[in-house]
Image (cartoon, coloured by chain):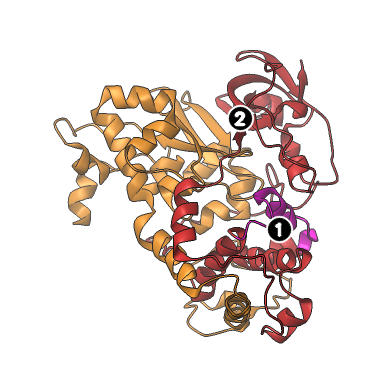
Amino acid sequence: MRDADHEPSAGVPDEHPDHNHPDHSELGPMDARVRALESILVDKGYVQREALDEIVEAYETRIGPHGGARVVARAWTDPDYAARLAADATSAVAELGLGGRQGEHMVAVFDDAGTHHLVVCTLCSCYPWAVLGIPPAWYKSSAYRARAVFEPRAVLADFGTVLPDDTRIRVWDSTAEIRYLVVPRRPAGTEGWDAERLAELVTRDAMIGVRLADEPAAVGARS
Amino acid sequence: MNGAHDLGGTMGFGEVVPEVDEPVFHTDWERRAMAVTLAGAMLGRWTLDESRHVRENRPPATYLTSAYYRIWLDALESLLVAHGLVGADELADGRAHRPGDDGVTAVSPGTVTRVLARGAPTERRAEGTPAFAVGQAVRARNIHPGGHTRLPRYVRGHRGTVELVHGAHVLPDTNAHGGGENPEWLYTVRFAGTELWGEAADPSVEVSVDAWESYLEPA
């Protein structure tokens, strides 16, 4: 794994060398520090330990890109829903039981034959947690945040995504509490598919805009 | 502030390297740091804007070389001390020396469920009418506030077009510093890549930011 947010720069001493362990398996100073802070907060009556477990459980199981994939697949199969998603994404997402923290104010942007959308947060790591879960490390990396607004085609190439030169690239820098969800184009060869099956083609990366939706063959290849 | 966090257009970081089948968390301490940070925020003693400012307000060399959740944890500890909830001695010793603040209700699983479902909407009832309309040309002000702001450096002084009007939203610049919410109209402003990065830039690229009214002037 290489990750700019986990790897210190060359020549800069890392005071917490556990970040560099490729398997991250040893208990290091950060483990001790987090555990101590947890105990302080619990002992002082500020936080119930079960509340921490609940937060982890929510983001490791219930809240993740499968939620956003349901939104996109529904938009692909239901033009009325797509119109509501375009007009008021917060409400349309709520129809599917999604929303809340880091998804309070949603905007959906739709790729078409001439336009490709890409989402970034250059100032920190704003991300639509309510529909995509926890952002991947690369989204939070200095490289992505620095380059997505400056040379988005080169960033797309890092993901193996190559678009025609005349495709308009729209980059959305999430500088406020508006959270952007990319609705990628529906892949060819999926005529007649229902929303549940289509959702399998909608990856997290496609909803950030660094990749296109998977091709139908990918579903078979994964299963 | 013109901090190291304001990364748009910075060069030298190398490629973006996606990880195949990336786990939600890479280490257990990251998992716990995320949870304790969210739980700390649920105490309601500080705003999201204040926590963002505490994270970005550090020496550039430290910011750029710290693990992501390390920055979160550093900020959480600073916030807990600054708001009088935890003593610096307790952090140093790694254990509680005194009972907590009586006014605090412990964050419970029920609190978590409620907060995750509702979030913290920042839209407020709008006063008056927006100064700018969709399609109007505007310029991002050439301002360099010393405190928190959400106007990235790479758009300052540049001319763009209003794309969306979002209603009135809490202004981070004051809300981060105890100065109140001061809701202002919020806009999405679209800039041509060539306007931001010069004539050599890719003409097919456009970049938008979300900008509060006081970040903008007519162009």
**Drawn side of residue B114 relative to residue B217, left or right:** left
Of discs 2 and 1, which sits in the foreground? 1
The picture places residue A206, in percent across and down from the top left corner, at 39, 42
Q: Is any atom of residue A210 visible in this view? A: no
Q: Residues within 10 Å of mark 1 (few under 14, many from 20)?
A: many
Q: Which residues are magenta?
A: B43-61
Q: Which residue is mark 1?
A: B55
Chain B: drawing colour: red
Residue positioned 71% across, 69% down in the render: B85
Say whether residue B41 is magenta: no
Q: Which residue is mark 2?
A: B208
Q: Quadrant of residue A114?
A: top left
Q: Compared to B17, does A75 lie above or below?
A: above
The picture places residue A108, in percent across and down from the top left corner, at 44, 31
**Drawn side of residue B89 relative to residue A103, left or right:** right
Q: Tell me the orange chain.
A: A
